[in-house]
Amino acid sequence: MIFTKFAPEYKEVKSLKKVAFYTLGCKLNYAETSTISRMFEKKGYKKVGFEETPDIFIVNTCSVTENADKKCKKIVKEAKKISPNGFIAIIGCYAQLKPQEIATISGVDAVLGAAEKFRLIELLDDFAAGQEAKVYASSIAEAEEFNNAYSIHDRTRTFLKVQDGCNYGCAFCTIPLARGKSRSDTIINIVAAANEIAATEVKEIVITGVNIGDFGIHNGKRKEKFIDLIQALDKVSGIDRFRISSIEPNLLTNEAITFVAQSKHFVPHFHVPLQSGSNTILRKMGRRYLRELYEDRVSKIKGLMPHCCIGVDVIVGFPGETEELFLETYEFLKELPISYLHVFTYSERANTRAAEMDEVVPMKTRNKRSKMLRILSEKKKRAFYEENLGKTYTVLFEGDVEDGKMHGFTENYIRVSAKYDPLLINELKNVTLVNINEKGSVDVFEPETEEIHH
Ligand code: SF4
């Protein structure tokens, strides 16, 4: 009798457990954290902020983040301060690379690798802390399954994961070690997820993966193609915009560029990693193209879409990057009609080929080169914005307010600023770009008073 009386109450207490998430790294990690958090919510857990004394903390880590180990330790320390009895689980790329090292951090209760992170609730069912951290990290070769994921942060944009892992072996990169072989979701599943997202009023989907141009491998065999995926998504109704996150230049086909150019839903914005503008360094990095191919991709895009935004990833200070070779990159980027750069300062990662290479570039030089490219990026961005002044684009407004202003992005990724109006949140609006303000975003034409027509 006592048991039946108390059992439901016990369940109730359990279902009210509070869980908080902390995510480091890329869009893929954000998409995965979001999906894992929905798994918790489905099981009756309450998702709370990090400071709201959670019972469980899930930290999704990144192997590319600078000082991943220090950051991880700091987050664990903070979590312990907030909830001294809270259960702390570490997942993600860094957890896959260094599970034993993380398990020794004081306060960590569990570490889960790439193949286990989506089975977190099942594996750690009672979330009871033991004497030692539980480690569930099988070898990366076992991460063969594709786990779908998408993020829902606010109502405006979502990151939809379509592909995971990478079969390339760039000399500097730990991602294949942390995320495993290239594998993808099926087009049918992805379209179903896009329809599900459309029902939540999200207006823009960012297609995300590790190497999305390599889309279509199921169980080790290529079954579908990236072009078929984007053509299928273009037909999904209820999503106004699709943005392609980042795509390797050698996999960005003429067919895909031509398709985006005529699509009403795929926006004119590409993010194409270059990494170096020197063929000597590209070869050392093990990249699968030379600068001529990159130049050709950019001119193909610009030929069809002169207003297209092109973002570029570039690494400075890779071993062997002499001053002369760096200047090759600098001049190459200076001449290309690109819109902004994401600059990464090279840093050695354990178990990569690059970490063993000679001709190491001193840190001071790496930082100096990084600064030069950041300044170039600002100039490129400004020139791109200037080229577009006076033109009319569509902005998707977001919910944040800053000094009475709200912001949003045009289809070609220009950050726009306008007077705050709650009715515009998550709405697409045609605007004319007027001038670049002191904060670096673009003001739009706004009539002083609203016109009333009788
Ligand atoms: S393409 Fe190269 S840099 Fe990109 S994830 Fe694969 S190995 Fe890493």
Image (cartoon, rainbow, N blue to C red):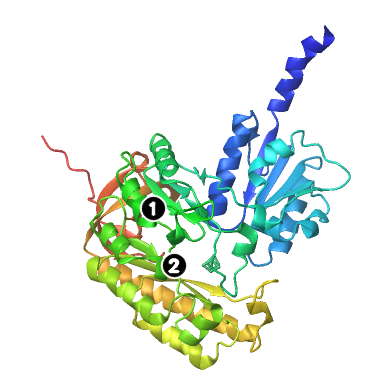
How many tags in the picture? 2
Q: Nearer the viewer, residue 198 or 112?
A: 112
382 and 344: which is toward the camera: 344
The image position of residue 189, as x and y in percent, is 44, 41
Would residue 154 be found to the left or right of residue 59 on screen?
A: left
Q: Amino acid at mark 2?
A: Glu
Q: Residue at x 77, y 53 (%)?
A: 77
Visible in this render: residue 22? yes
Residue annotated with mark 1:
407
Q: Which residue is mark 2?
A: 248
Mark positioned earlier in the residue sequence (2 or 1): 2
Q: Nearer the viewer, mark 2 or mark 1?
A: 2
User: Is 124 left or right of 389, judged from the image as shown?
Assistant: right
Rendering coords of residue 317 (x, y %): 57, 82
- The picture places residue 449, in percent across and down from the top left corner, at 22, 46
Residue lying at the far front in this picture: please name it.
221
Q: CA distance from mark 2 to mark 1?
A: 29 Å
Q: In the displayed image of the protein, which residue is found farthest to the bottom?
A: 324
On whether ligand 1 comes within 8 Å of the CB at mark 2, the answer is yes
Indicate the quadrant containing the N terminus: top left, top right, bottom left or bottom right: top right
Residue 348: quadrant of the picture: bottom right
What residue is shown at x 71% (from left), y 53% (from top)? Answer: 75
